[in-house]
Image (cartoon, helix red, strand yellow):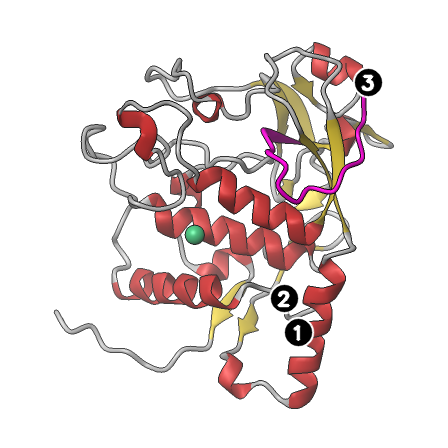
Amino acid sequence: MAIVFLCLVGQEVFGQIPIACSDVTSLENLACCPATSDGVCGQDASKGQCTELNLPGYDRSSVDARHNWPHYFTRICKCNGNYSGYGCNRCKFGHYGPDCSQSHVLPRRPIANYTDSDWADFIDTIVQSRSFDSGYMVVLEEAAPGTTNLSMTNISLYNFYVWMHHYAAKDSNTMDLENRLDYAHAGPAFTTWHRYFNLWFVSSSPNDPLFILHHAMVDCMFDKWLELHPDAEYPNDIPMTVTTTGHQPDDFMVPFFPLSTNADMFTRSSNFGYSCDLPNITNPQA
Ligand SMILES: [Cu+2]
């Protein structure tokens, strides 16, 4: 396997692969089902099992590779109970403990209430994330699924998040209608995509608090909306002529791995282990 260590400034990236699934066998078999001391996908400890991926039924055979996310794998770990992660060796957001049975809800505080010490922690954590390893390899060339000699490089946590946002929102290389492809904005997935993005950023952090301030604020407004609309569900009747692919409820959000759908994220933040300390806002329509 050709592993190229490059500075990523100005370098186009075409995908991400967990380091645990970057070996020739995983790539050849299109399977990200890593083995731990608990067996493949933790199956010996009933944490999960390796399963065939179910992709949404509509046509995904466009020239833009993002339609086929995650294009490197057709078999992934399906986790049981509160287990999560690409190898089922982590807990779902908001859960912890040896069997992931415990849960917590941590407050996300407004930056206006930060002390000098909080600010110092925050800045220090952002700086550290520039050298903290993400645990993923990024792919530096376009390649067909099943290619085993991918050109890949390690990526820092900070660059990993910058890359994911760019990849989800960038224009297509083609000049047809799909040129307006945007998996993260310009549709209802704006809320759900950024929620998953924030959850990753916070949970990957060696310290607390770490989140991108602007996105965190938008996410808390989304959560307030969910509180005021307890019966709301992710819209399931959006014509494909109105928005682009990636915005349907069962679409996998690009380019996250482990996979998550928009509908998965359309629920109160307490289900993911945090709450938002926002001022009281009353529903103007109530
Ligand atoms: Cu964004």
Dot 1 and dot 3 residues touching (CB under 8 Å): no
Tell me the quarter of the picture where residue 169 sits.
top left
- Residue that appears at 50% across and 85% down: 112
Instruction: State the CA–CA distance, disc 1 to disc 2.
Output: 6 Å
Amino acid under disc 1: Phe
Secondary structure state at the residue bearing disc 1: helix
Residue 256: which numbered mark, if any? none
Give the percent coordinates (x, y) of residue 210. Answer: 63, 66
Where does the magenta region start and end? Answer: 1-16
Give the percent coordinates (x, y) of residue 28. Answer: 71, 10
Give the percent coordinates (x, y) of residue 51. Answer: 61, 19
- Residue that appears at 52% across and 77% down: 109
Residue 210: which numbered mark, if any? 2
Residue 31: tell me if it is visible: yes
What is the tally of numbered marks visible in this picture? Answer: 3
Residue 266: tell me if it is visible: no
The C terminus - image quarter? bottom left
Dot 1 and dot 2 residues touching (CB under 8 Å): yes
Above or below residue 245? Residue 183 is: below
> Of residues 3 and 269, which is closer to you in this image?
3
- Lower position in the chain sequence, tag 1 or tag 3: 3
Residue 122: which numbered mark, if any? 1
Amino acid under disc 2: Leu
Above or below residue 169? Residue 217 is: below
Q: Main secondary structure of the magenta part?
A: loop
Nearest-to-viewer mark from 1 and 3: 3
Residue 165 lies left or right of residue 20; in this view the side is left
Tag 3 residue: 1
Q: Let me know if residue 74 is in the magenta part.
A: no
Query: Which residue is outermost to the front?
Result: 10
> Of residues 247 and 283, which is closer to you in this image?
247
